Structure formats: C-alpha cells, structure tokens
Amino acid sequence: MKKIDVVIIGASASGLMCAIEAGKRGRKVMVLDHANKAGKKILMSGGGRCNFTNYHVAPENYVSHNVHFCKSALSRYTPWDFLSLVERHGIAFHERQHGQLFCNDSAKDILTMLLAECRQVGVSVHLRTKIESINFVAEDQFKICSSLGELCCQSLVVASGGLSIPSLGATPFGYQLAEQFGIKIWPTSAGLVPFTLQPMDKARFAELSGIAVDSIVSNQRQQFRENILLTHRGLSGPVILQISSYWQPGEAIAINWLPELMLFDELKVLQQQQPQLRLKTFLTKYLPKRLVEKLLDAHDIDIPLRRFSHREFRQIADQLQHWLIKPNGTEGYRTAEVTLGGVDCDAISSKTMESHGVKGLYFVGEVLDVTGWLGGYNFQWAWSSAWCAGQYV
Ligand SMILES: Cc1cc2nc3c(=O)[nH]c(=O)nc-3n(C[C@H](O)[C@H](O)[C@H](O)COP(=O)(O)OP(=O)(O)OC[C@H]3O[C@@H](n4cnc5c(N)ncnc54)[C@H](O)[C@@H]3O)c2cc1C
C-alpha cells in the first residue's frame, strides 16, 4: 500500500490550491480526479476568460446556513492574495463592472498557473482515477481503494465540488463521503441558474426571446440590479442568475423593468407638460417596443397621456415596475453555475476546514454549504477555503 501525507480528491480550483499550499509545507501530496482533464470548470468559466475573483468580496456575498463560516477564510486569503499570484505569473487581467476580475486572454492561464505551482512543489496530479472506497482505518490513517491501487494517507481533502454541470465531471461524491462519516448535508439545489416559465407564460413571452434590459429583480430576501435576458426557455441574464440563489420553488419574483424612473410620478408630471404625448412613445424611449406592447397588452397605450386617469397610471406603473411572475422552476444542474447547500459548515472548522468529528478529513470549495454570488465570488471561496486547509493538512 502506497503511503502519502495528503490525498486530495478533485483537481480543480480548490483541490489544486490546497495541493500547492500543502506542497509548499513539504507535505507529499497526491491529487486524484476521475476526469480526463484538470480544472474543467476553470476552463469553462467566465465565458472562457475566468472571472477569477472580485474586488468587493465580503461575507454578505455568500449564501449558507451558517453565514459566519466563510468570514475567517475570506479574511485570511483575500482577492489581493490571489491577485499577487496571478501577477507573479504575468497573467494579464482586467476589471469589469461590479469589481469582477477576468483574464485578458484565456481561463487556461489560471489553470496553467495552478498546475505550474503544483509541479514546483512536487504535487502529483492523477487524472482518470476512479475512487472505489475510502475508509478510516486507524488513528490518522485513511485507506483509499482506487484505480491506482491502494493508498494510505494522513489527511484526506474532499475538493470534489457540487452537482452543477454533470457533463463537466460533477458528481455527488463529496456529499456521499460526508454522509459515510456521519456529517450532515444540507439539501442541494441549483444556484446561479436561469428560470423556466409556466407553459402559458412561456408561450406568451417566447417572441421576446433575445431582449436584454437593465432591471431590478427582487423577492422578500434579496434584490439585484443587472441585465435580464428573455430566452426561448424563460428568464436568464445576470440578474436572474443572482436571484435564483435566493429563490424557493413556488415563489414569485418582482421585476422592475424601469429602474431609473419613478414612473407614476413621472407620468403625472408629463401629463401636465405634454398632454398630447402618446404613452407608448414615451415608454419606448426606455424599453424595446415589443416588450412594452407585451407587458401592457391589457391596456391601450397608443393614445395621448391626457386620456389616462391617475388610477390607470398607477396600474401601468405597477405593471412595469413591480411585475410579478412565478417561475415554473429552474433549468437545474444542467446549466447551473453552482450548487446551493452541501456539507454542513457547523461540522467543519472555519479555521482549518477539518471535520470536527473525523480527524484528518477536510472539505474545501463548493462541496461545502457556501455559495457565492455571480462575479468571481465562487472562485474566491475555492481559493480561500483551500488555502486555509493547505496550511494544516
Ligand atoms: C459554466 C460555469 C462557469 C463558471 N464561471 C465562474 C466564474 O467566472 N467565476 C466564479 O467565481 N465561479 C464560476 N463558476 C463556479 C466555479 O467554477 C466553481 O464554484 C468552482 O469551480 C468550484 O471549485 P471546486 O474546486 O470546489 O469544484 P470543481 O471546480 O467543481 O471541481 C471538482 C473536481 O472534482 C472532480 N470530481 C468530482 N467527482 C469526483 C469523483 N467522484 N472522483 C474523482 N474526482 C471527482 C471533478 O472532476 C472536478 O475536477 C462557474 C461554474 C460553471 C459551471
């Protein structure tokens, strides 16, 4: 049986970061992954440019049943720490809106950097490796039966991610292993994911597919302002992905299609100033004509403002600024960027990422019940949590 200090399951963002840090401490590290390529999600991320972190990372940008858990790791390994690694490797990057940082060239630069760091500290990465079983055999000893044979390690790190995009290698491995060791799993669901619509709404809005507008989308728990995109399947765009992580099945969301205006007040003033102006002419200065016609199809809007009552203005303003729609569901793990829920943070040390109950067993990255907003927050969680574990494994 081969003896190793640290075995890490998952050769992607969190697994490679943990391996680098453990390797720097002189630990003998093996990273195992069943995929044929390391870091598939890194390569796919940020439209191929990897939104690798965000200047504004804060605990408030994460969803978890334990909102305090992420604080320690995020403060010990910050976006600036990751940026200095990126700069040391000469990777050119740029900032987009909301503090999001992307590679100028390709997400491949980030993966190449992580693998180069692994090589430098003697970490071995084994792809196409099937994990058959894992058992705790003695004090500080895990036995791993795999397609590489039997391995024995002191520290076992689960960096196997969540369930989103099975075609990129996602499996429930981490959750099953946690359960095997008696660790609670919070129910999982797709996050950062487009909504599907009820059949009637879908038919009604299908012809608007392709329209994208700045909007505020909210529910009782959160609100976001970014673009909404109407698609032939339903609602998408960054603002929808963001609110999806706060959405419960059966719940309605409210859409403000005109976030810049106080529409009701504006219409009352305009009625005085330009009574002959047609409502449709006014609204289509701000929104695509097809969208206005569809959202207000119960009203005759191609008439002068003078012909409207204040009551009608109120109804129209509500329709455009507090438009309620009940999604049918989400597109699910097939297109979700992340998985909500997962390994219960209360069972894990926020300092070391080690399980309280099983010495030597660590969880890092997305497998934990910590889910970031869209915008580089999820990679930062992978880097931060894995860096912390890397100091102790
Ligand atoms: C399309 C897409 C785009 C994204 N873009 C961004 C972005 O721009 N910015 C951002 O911050 N976040 C983004 N994310 C989210 C981000 O990719 C993840 O949060 C992050 O990769 C999590 O890192 P991880 O290492 O914990 O898990 P993962 O990256 O999911 O890695 C898990 C690894 O474990 C391996 N594995 C799984 N099961 C097994 C098993 N049974 N045996 C062996 N190995 C196994 C997998 O093959 C994989 O290599 C995106 C996600 C997707 C799907």
Image (tube, helix red, strand yellow):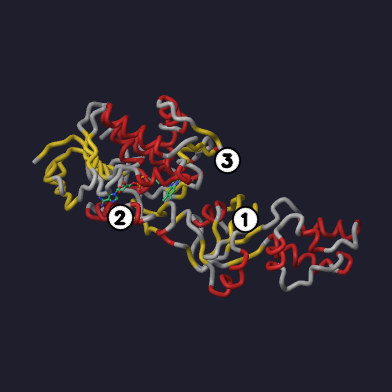
SS of the residue under disc 3:
helix
Mark 3 is on which residue type?
His
Question: Where residue 376 sits: x, y (%)?
Answer: 48, 42
Q: Is mark 2 within 8 Å of ligand 1?
A: yes
Q: Earlier in the sequence, mark 1 or mark 3?
A: 3
Mark 1 is on which residue type?
Ala
Question: Where residue 266 sits: x, y (%)?
Answer: 81, 56
Residue with the mark numbered 2? 171
Which disc is residue 98 wearing? Answer: 3
**Residue sitting at x 74%, y 55%:** 286
Residues marked 2 and 3 touching at CB (< 8 Å): no
Q: Residue furthest top?
A: 88
Which disc is residue 43 wearing? Answer: none
Q: Please, is residue 3 above or below residue 36 in the view? A: above
Q: Nearer the viewer, residue 109 or 277?
A: 109
Mark 2 is on which residue type?
Thr
Number of the front mark, 2 or 1: 1
Residue with the mark numbered 1? 212
Mark 2 to mark 3: distance in Å? Answer: 31 Å
Q: Earlier in the sequence, mark 2 or mark 3?
A: 3
For the N terminus, the image quarter is top left
